[in-house]
Image: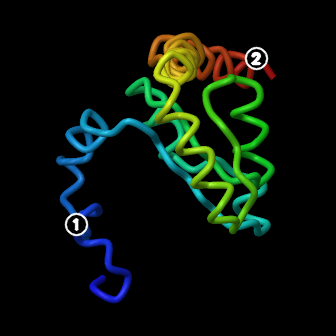
Amino acid sequence: MDELDLNDVVDFEGWQEVRLFPSYLIAAHIGISPLHRNLHHDTTYANKLFQYMSFSLPLLVSDVTAQKNLINEVKSGLIHKEKDANDIAEKIKILYNDPALSHELGQNGKRFIEQKFSWEKVSRNLKDLYLEFEKS
C-alpha cells in the first residue's frame, strides 16, 4: 500500500489465521463495518458486529439498513454515511476523543450479547422451537 503513504500508521497484514482473531479484537479500540448498500447487506447482519460487541468494542457502521437498525436498537455505536470517507473520519474522531462514550457504547453491546445471544438463551429458544414443532 505504498501508493497510499499509510505504512507508518496502518499495518496491512493480509490474510490471518482465524485463531488470531480474538487477539486483534483485544488490541482494537473500535469495531468498524463500512459495508456498502445492497440487498444482502441491507437484510442480514455481518457476524463481525456480534464478535465486536462480545469484546465490548464500540461500533462504527455504515448506514446499511440491517446494521443501522441493530446499532440504533442496542445503542452500541455510531453510524456513518455509506461510502463517505469524511463522515467515517469524523465518527472515528468522536470515538477516539470521547473515551467515556466509547466505553458506554462498548458496554451496551457486550450487555446485549450476554442477554440475547448467550448459549443458554439461544439453546433454550431452539429447544422450545423443537418442542413446539413436535406438538404439531
Residue at the image point whose x is 52% and y is 25% from the top? 98
- The spot of residue 104 in percent (x, y) is 55, 15
Q: Is residue 133 above or below residue 95?
A: above
Using the rendered image of the protein, determine whether residue 33 is visible from the camera's viewpoint.
yes
Q: Which of the 4 image quadrants contains residue 116?
A: top right
- Asked whether, in this view, residue 56 is left or right of residue 133, the answer is left
Q: Which residue is mark 1?
A: 8
Of callouts 1 and 2, the N-terminal one: 1
- Circle 2: element type: helix
* Residue 107 image position (x, y, % from top left): 50, 15
Q: CA distance from mark 1 to mark 2?
A: 62 Å
Relative to the observer, which residue lies in front, 109 or 19? Answer: 109
Q: Residue at x 62, y 49 (%)?
A: 90
Q: Which mark is residue 135?
A: 2
Residue at left offset 51%, top offset 16%: 100
Closer to the eye: label 1 or 2: 1
| In-front residue for pair 99/68 | 99
Q: Is residue 9 left or right of residue 43?
A: left
Amino acid of disc 2: Lys
Amino acid of disc 1 = Asp
Give the percent coordinates (x, y) of residue 82.
73, 62
Other residues around mark 1 within 10 Å, as few (<14) / some (14–19) / many (≥20): few
- The image shows residue 108, relative to residue 67, as above or below, that is above
Position above or below: 64 against 110: below
Q: Is residue 3 above or below residue 43?
A: below
Q: Position of residue 61 (x, y in %)?
A: 63, 48
**Can the viewer see residue 117?**
no
Around disc 2, counting alpha carbons within 10 Å, would you say few (fewer than 14), some (14 to 19), or many (20 or more)? few
Is the C terminus in the top left, top right, bottom left or bottom right quadrant? top right
